[in-house]
Image (spheres, rainbow, N blue to C red):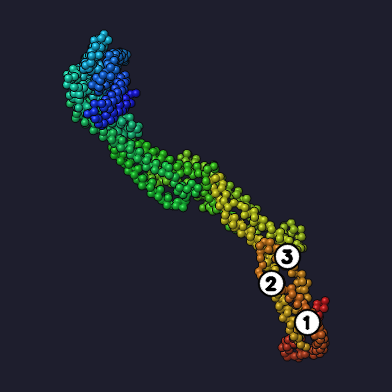
């Protein structure tokens, strides 16, 4: 057991001792009774327990000694144990450990010698000794040797302070003498190493200081024109060595101060340490700025600062040739530093301004001009706020264009250039190219968005949508998908891409001498952008063609909205179907014979449109073409369904109207006939007789048709029911009542016919007598007419008399016509009624 385990075990033992002692000390004994052995029994038991504790402590102490890593920890253990090891039982065990200290010291000396040999071998092979981190080489070697010396000296000193017979006897042994000799030899080797390392350094310090301080301040590479501070690293090494030698001396104990002191030349150099350090820092900064200008100034920028750089080179020439580290150079270094820093600062600021220009232009590199609605990948391209978006982008780019022109003007001042020189124009062209590149990237961002979103590939969702509508007599798209039609989809896409290109017109051209007011023309001439734009427009044309093909798929239904329904119905009602050109040509001038449609033909027509309705209902309301274009045909579908319904309803309505009209006409006929036949007739009432006979004739004419009309009407109603067309209640009531009323009317007609028979005969005879009398009157009038004045030569007013006779003859003709009509009417009605 080691470390904390031994410590814990020791504490447990002492705690156990305290417990035994407490038990023994807390008990009370009767000291007056000489025969009482209780105290001696307890004492002997306590003594046995203490002996057991001592044995256990001896085991722990010996184990702790065996676990010591070296002589230093072993001596520390002996100091800690102090008088505890003098207890008899512990002493008997621990005395055997003292001679082992000599062996531990011997191993320590061997380890130290091995470390020394390894270091010497490394120095011999690499001329480099392992030193402390951030410590210079010489001081590091001295410090290493001192630490190795301390490693062997401390345990040897501790050996002298331990007084124990077993150890004193071991010190006199041959092994102990060998350890002592090894120790002394190591001390000699370390002293020699320290002296040798220090003297080697001292021997070259004076020459290094004198030679290197007389060198020029800077050196220049003739090939690259870059400069560097000419402060030799050997001088820096000397300064560091002196610094750490001072630190080593200051931190060492008073009784162990190092004997090494730096040479006078090194001390003199170290006395200028702060000044030299300041010079080196300033020169390093100057060199860094100067080299930055040389290395980072672009070919187009160099002509603008060549004269300024030449002036600085003229100042630096002194530092390259005449000035060295021994002279008074503070003012000179500061002057050169300020000049170089001023130029470098202006160059850096000019470069930063160009970067600002690029950064300003890159604001929209990842923000297309037109996008889907915010946060929704499935939505269409958002063009609702197109005007506002364009105005906002225009204002933003125009505002940043002003900043870009201001930054370019600032660079003109930073370079101390003149805007009329060719050098400045070349620089402006360079910045102008930067802006051009950024505009290309900006416009490409928007075009790429459209290009990527209009690719027919899985994962894309519709970006655009057109509505297909029926506007008789045509099917149209909104927006129009005809390339030649104004305000169509092609024009929309063309205007969108034009808006994207127009962004380049919001900044006036930096290179005004290029002949263009802005950058739009350059963008339109760019092959890369044009290729993407052409690709987009080709896709638009292709999708428009597909949309037209989709529209053409509905041409089979075109007759539904193109043909005249009334004309179709009229032909159907006249011929039972629509006449074809072949039928018309076949019958020529005679015309196609009429053939009224049957109820079955009506059913065929209605079923035809019902079937079409079911087909159209299955048509999808939206269809996606190439994943990025959607056609919404919901309005077209609804309009087409409505057209089909109108066609179907036309035939249904005709059936409904025919049923309603037939029943209404019959009801009205019965009403009028019953009223006419119910009038009383008197002898000589010719007009009344004619009216009654007219009613009887009408009943006779429509009897056959009316007797057979009710069953077909019922069939029509049943057919309409199959199409969910319910008739009005009044129709069903008429169908129930009218047959009985019609039978009643027929009975009335039979009765009236029998009643008016004699009256008909009398009227006919009366008319015949009147006709005979008219013949007599006509013959008499003819004889008189032959004797009138106009036939005489001496008649004074022949025309007046002829006019009067013409009027008389006309009256007689009217009278004859009425008699003929009355007689013919009575005879016809009599024959009709009789048949």
Marked residue nearer the N-terminal end (1 or 3)? 3
Q: Are marks 2 and 3 in contact (CB under 8 Å)?
A: no
Visible in this render: residue 806?
Answer: no
Q: Residue at x 70, y 76 (%)?
A: 668
Say what secondary structure mark 3 lies in: helix
Disc number lying in front (1 or 3): 3
When the figure is inspected, residue 207 is found, relative to residue 298, above or below; the finding is: above
Question: Which quadrant holds residue 538?
Answer: top right
Decide if residue 215 is on the left or right side of residue 366. Answer: left
Question: Among all residues in the image, which is located at the extreme top?
Answer: 174
Which residue carries the number 2 mark?
733
Marked residue nearer the N-terminal end (2 or 1)? 2
> Between residues 476 and 629, which one lies in front from this camera angle?
629
Q: How many numbered marks appear?
A: 3
Where residue 337 appears, x then y in whole percent? 24, 31
Q: Are marks 1 and 3 in contact (CB under 8 Å)?
A: no
Which residue carries the number 3 mark?
715
Q: Are marks 2 and 1 in contact (CB under 8 Å)?
A: no
Visible in this render: residue 686?
Answer: yes
Where residue 823 appears, x then y in whole percent? 80, 82
Which residue carries the number 1 mark?
752
> Between residues 10 and 665, which one lies in front from this camera angle?
10
When the figure is inspected, residue 190 is found, relative to residue 768, above or below; the finding is: above
When the figure is inspected, residue 768 is found, relative to residue 622, above or below; the finding is: below
Marked residue nearer the N-terminal end (2 or 3)? 3
Say what secondary structure mark 1 lies in: helix
Disc number lying in front (2 or 3): 2
When the figure is inspected, residue 755 is found, relative to residue 38, above or below; the finding is: below
Q: Residue at x 78, y 72 (%)?
A: 704
Q: Residue at x 78, y 82 (%)?
A: 752
């Amino acid at each position: 057991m080691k470390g904390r385990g031994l410590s814990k075990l020791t504490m447990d033992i002492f705690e156990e001792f305290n417990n035994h002692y407490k038990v023994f000390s807390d008990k009370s004994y009767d000291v007056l009774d000489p025969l009482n052995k209780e105290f001696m029994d307890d004492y002997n038991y306590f003594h046995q327990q203490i002996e057991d504790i001592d044995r256990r402590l001896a085991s722990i102490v010996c184990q702790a000694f065996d676990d010591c890593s070296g002589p230093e920890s072993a001596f520390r253990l002996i100091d800690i144990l102090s008088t505890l090891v003098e207890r008899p039982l512990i002493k008997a065990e621990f005395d055997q450990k003292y001679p082992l200290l000599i062996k531990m010291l011997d191993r320590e000396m061997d380890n130290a010698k091995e470390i020394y040999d390894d270091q010497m071998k490394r120095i011999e092979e690499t001329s480099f000794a392992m030193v402390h981190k951030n410590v210079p080489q010489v001081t590091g070697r001295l410090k290493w040797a001192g630490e190795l010396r301390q490693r062997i000296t401390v345990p040897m000193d501790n050996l002298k302070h331990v007084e124990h017979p077993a150890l004193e006897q071991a010190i006199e042994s041959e092994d102990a003498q060998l350890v002592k000799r090894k120790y002394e030899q190591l001390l000699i080797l370390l002293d020699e190493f320290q002296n040798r390392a220090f003297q080697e350094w001292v021997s070259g310090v004076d020459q290094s200081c004198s030679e290197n301080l007389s060198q020029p301040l800077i050196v220049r590479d003739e090939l690259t024109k870059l400069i560097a501070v000419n402060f030799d690293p050997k001088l820096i090494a000397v300064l560091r060595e002196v610094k750490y030698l001072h630190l080593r001396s200051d931190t060492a104990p008073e009784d162990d101060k190092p004997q090494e002191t730096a040479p006078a030349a090194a001390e003199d150099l170290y006395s200028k340490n702060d000044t030299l350090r300041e010079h080196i820092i300033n020169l390093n900064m100057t060199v860094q700025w100067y080299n930055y200008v040389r290395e980072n100034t672009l070919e187009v920028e160099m002509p603008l600062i060549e004269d300024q750089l030449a002036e600085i080179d003229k100042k630096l020439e002194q530092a390259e040739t005449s000035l060295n580290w021994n002279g008074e150079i503070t003012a000179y270094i500061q002057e050169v530093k300020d000049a170089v820093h001023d130029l470098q600062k202006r160059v850096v600021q000019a470069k930063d301004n160009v970067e600002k220009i690029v950064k300003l232009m890159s604001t929209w590199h990842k923000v297309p001009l037109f996008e889907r609605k915010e946060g929704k990948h499935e939505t269409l391209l958002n063009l609702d706020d197109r005007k506002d978006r364009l105005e906002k982008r225009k204002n933003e780019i125009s505002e940043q264009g002003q900043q870009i022109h201001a930054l370019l003007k600032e660079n003109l001042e930073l370079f101390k250039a003149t805007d009329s020189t060719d050098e400045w124009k070349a620089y402006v062209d360079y910045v102008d190219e930067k802006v051009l590149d950024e505009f290309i990237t900006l416009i490409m961002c928007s075009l790429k968005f459209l290009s990527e979103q209009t690719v027919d590939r899985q994962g894309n969702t519709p970006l655009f949508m057109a509505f297909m509508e029926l506007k008789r007599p045509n099917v149209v798209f909104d927006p129009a998908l005809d390339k030649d039609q104004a305000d169509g989809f092609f024009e929309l896409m063309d205007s969108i891409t034009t808006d994207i290109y127009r962004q380049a017109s919001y900044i006036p051209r930096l290179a005004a001498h290029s002949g263009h007011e802005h950058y739009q023309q350059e963008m339109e001439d760019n092959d890369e952008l044009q290729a993407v734009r052409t690709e987009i427009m080709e896709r638009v044309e292709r999708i428009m063609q597909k949309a037209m093909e989709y529209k053409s798929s509905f041409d089979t239904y075109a007759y539904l909205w193109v043909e005249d329904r009334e004309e179709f119905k009229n032909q159907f009602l006249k011929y039972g179907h629509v006449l074809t050109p072949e039928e018309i040509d076949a019958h020529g001038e005679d015309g196609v014979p009429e053939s009224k449609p049957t109820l079955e033909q009506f059913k065929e027509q209605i079923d035809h449109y019902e079937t079409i309705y079911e087909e159209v209902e299955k048509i999808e309301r939206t269809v996606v073409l190439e994943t990025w274009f959607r056609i919404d045909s919901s309005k077209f579908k609804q309009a087409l369904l409505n057209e089909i319904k109108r066609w179907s309803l036309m035939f249904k309505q005709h059936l409904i109207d025919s049923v309603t009209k037939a029943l209404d006409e019959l009801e009205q006929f019965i009403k009028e006939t019953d009223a006419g036949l119910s009038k009383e007739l008197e002898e000589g009432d010719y007009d009344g007789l004619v009216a009654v006979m007219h009613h009887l004739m009408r009943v006779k004419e429509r009897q056959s048709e009316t007797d057979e009309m009710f069953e077909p009407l019922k069939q029509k109603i049943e057919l309409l029911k199959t199409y969910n067309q319910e008739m009005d209640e009044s129709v069903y009531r008429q169908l129930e009542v009218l047959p009985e009323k019609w039978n009643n009317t027929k009975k009335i007609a039979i009765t009236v016919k029998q009643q008016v028979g004699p009256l008909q005969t009398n009227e006919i005879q009366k008319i015949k007598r009147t006709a005979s009398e008219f013949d007599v009157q006509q013959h008499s009038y003819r004889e008189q007419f032959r004797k009138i004045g106009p036939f005489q030569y001496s008649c004074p007013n022949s025309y007046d008399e002829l006019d009067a006779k013409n009027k008389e003859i006309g009256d007689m003709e009217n009278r004859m016509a009425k008699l003929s009509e009355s007689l013919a009417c009575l005879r016809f009605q009599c024959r009709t009624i009789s048949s």
